[in-house]
């Protein structure tokens, strides 16, 4: 989380951690879903979410 905030504070409007049940782990940036454990059926690898966001921001 810290890496995201430091690296992308100029483009990220909000970051939220929302507890849920059922093993859900989803990451949204500015309202856009960027990673979902439910869809991939696995937990994100170390650095995977940051890389997805980097690609999204850098285009």
Image (cartoon, grey):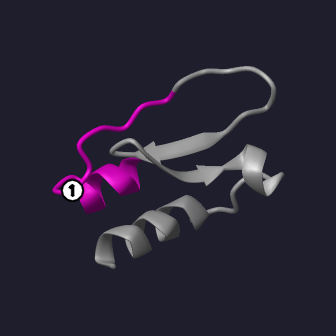
Looking at the image, residue 14 sits to the left or right of residue 33; the answer is: left
Q: Residue at x 67, y 21 (%)?
A: 20
Q: Residue furthest left?
A: 10
Towards the viewer: 42 or 4 = 42
Q: Residue at x 21, y 52 (%)?
A: 9
Towards the viewer: 49 or 36 = 36
Towards the viewer: 4 or 58 = 58
Towards the viewer: 44 or 33 = 33
In the rendered image, residue 46, in percent from the top left (x then y), is placed at 64, 62
In the rendered image, residue 2, in percent from the top left (x then y), is placed at 38, 48
**Callout 1 environment at 10 Å: few (<14), some (14 to 19), or many (20+)?**
few
Q: Residue at x 70, y 62 (%)?
A: 45
In the rendered image, residue 24, in percent from the top left (x then y), is placed at 72, 34
Q: Is residue 15 magenta?
A: yes
Q: Which residue is mark 1?
A: 11
The segment highlighted magenta reads: 1-17
In the rendered image, residue 4, in percent from the top left (x then y), is placed at 37, 55
**Image: 34 above or below 22:** below
Q: Is residue 34 magenta?
A: no
**Image: 17 above or below 29:** above
């Amino acid at each position: 989380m810290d890496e995201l905030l430091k690296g992308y504070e100029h483009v990220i409007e909000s970051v939220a951690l929302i507890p849920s049940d059922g093993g859900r782990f989803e990451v949204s940036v500015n309202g856009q879903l960027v990673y979902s454990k439910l869809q991939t059926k696995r937990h994100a690898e170390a650095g995977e979410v940051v890389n997805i966001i980097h690609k999204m921001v850098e285009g």
